[in-house]
Amino acid sequence: MSGPKSTADGEKVAASGLSIFSKYDPLKQRVDVVKKLGVDPFDMTFDDIMSATRGRIGNREIILAGTNNYLGLTFDPSTRASAKDAIDRHGTGTTGSRIANGTYVEHEQLERDLAAHLGKPSCIVFTTGYVTNLAAMAGLAGPNDVIFIDADAHACIIDGTRLAGTTTVRFRHNNPADLDKRLARQKIPEGGHALVVIEGLYSMFGDIAPIDEFVAVAHKHGAYLYVDEAHSYGVFGETGAGIAEEQGVLDKIDFYSGTFSKSLASVGGFCASRHPEFELLRKVMRPYMFTASAAPSNICAAQAALDAIKTRPELRHNIMARAAQLHAGLSDMGFELCAPASPVIAVRRDNEVQAAMEWNWLLQEGVYVNLAVPPGTPESSSLLRISVSAAHTEEDVNAILSRFKALKDNGDDIIAEMMRRMQ
Ligand code: PMP
């Protein structure tokens, strides 16, 4: 007899005899292989984090070079004091969403200060950066609108189009001419609009968008432009307002989103707009209305980090100097790097297995970077992705370089040794 059934121990199985998890069998096989190497790169735990640049696993001290802690402000005296003070004054959590009891004066103050920094009349703070893009994109785009996204868009931008439920068109990565062509070709339904979504600095390769050219294309077609500067806010631009500021087009950006989880040294996100009507979206964005607001300590840490962005330009100079040092050192050794020097430096490897083994070896040697492999990477590439911090010293970068030099010189032996350990 066919139909759903249970096994003797109560496990639910379909008529096929397979459980609900059976679709993940290929994933399980991959995870099992990776685990044999030592640490699972996607399921690892630090026993301690001691500073913006040092962690500990067991009794091994690790240089952190994959944390997106771009300005190194998570341990800054100002962010820590601000977060502690917020806990003392307001407790540990808001226990409510922004439309219920979750808006405190600090949320509003931060919104005003971010809006002022970006020169926009409106800014809304969310609980994470991921939620920010989901909320704002789905709030902005209705059934008649069409969203245009870059081929290498971050997962939360893709998920934003899903929540919006609109027609979505992908254009070639960082290619304004391709966008131009697709905008000209696409029929926008009566009463609808085009919303173009790009990022400032792409998080995998560390390459930078020509935002100024995208502004011109969007303007030509009457499209709205939405820029996610998650990886570039605080790092680029004369005042830290990102790549749009650096390229002189900040005032032309319709919607500017960012996260607190990188330069702002906290957890949360924001979207600012040059359209005051953006404020209305507070009443319709489901990921704003139906999730708890950011904790007071997160908001106050981000506020202190914003103050540092505005008053300590040396942080930007430091990170750029360290990025240049690391990029030059790696390219001198002959590594293939995916983009010119920026705070994200991606080292291309031949394949997933090589990258995973080298990642594990680097960790054993006291350097934490990110392993990035398909399907999460552009061009199905396998990468050792490094994120530089203003808190890294010249010596830290030299230490990272020395491990990569060993990989370059003894890569075959290292892989053979890792293979032996897997047996
Ligand atoms: N946008 C981009 C481009 C990102 O890379 C990320 C996260 N790395 C986010 C948004 C989401 O930020 P958060 O960690 O605050 O959810």
Image (cartoon, grey):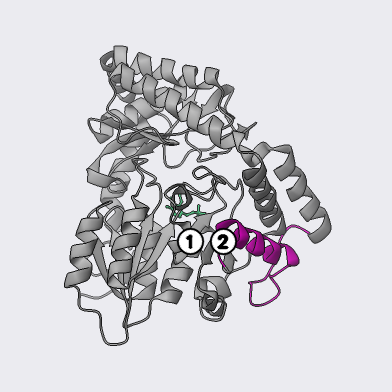
- Crowdedness near tag 1: few (<14), some (14–19) or many (≥20) residues, C-alpha within 10 Å: few
Q: Amino acid at mark 1?
A: Asp
Cβ atoms at labels 1 and 2 below 8 Å apart: yes
- For the C terminus, the image quarter is top left
Residue 422 badge: none
**Alpha carbons under labels 1 and 2: distance apart:** 7 Å
Q: Which residue is mark 2?
A: 119
Q: Secondary structure at mark 2?
A: loop
User: Which residue is at a point 49% across and 49% down the rendered structure image?
Assistant: 242
Amino acid type of the residue tagged 2 in the rendering: Gly
Assess whether residue 259 is covered by the magenta stretch.
Answer: no
Tally the numbered discs: 2
Q: Is residue 79 above or below residue 389?
A: below
Left or right: 98 as drawn, with respect to 225: right
Q: Is residue 181 left or right of residue 310?
A: left
The residue at the point 43 percent across, 75 percent down is 140
Question: Is residue 208 or residue 259 the one in the foreground?
Answer: 208
Res. 360 image quadrant: top left
Q: Which residue is mark 1?
A: 251
| Above or below, 66 relative to 247 | above
* Residue placed most toward the observer, 153 or 358: 153
Residue 9 appears in the figure: no
Residue closest to the eye, 147 or 213? 213
Residue drawn where x is 36% and y is 31% of the image: 36
Which residues make up the magenta segment? 91-120
Assign a secondary structure to mark 1: helix
Up/down of 91 relative to 190, above or below: above
Question: Which residue corresponds to the image point at 47% horizontal and 35% vertical from the top-left?
Answer: 66
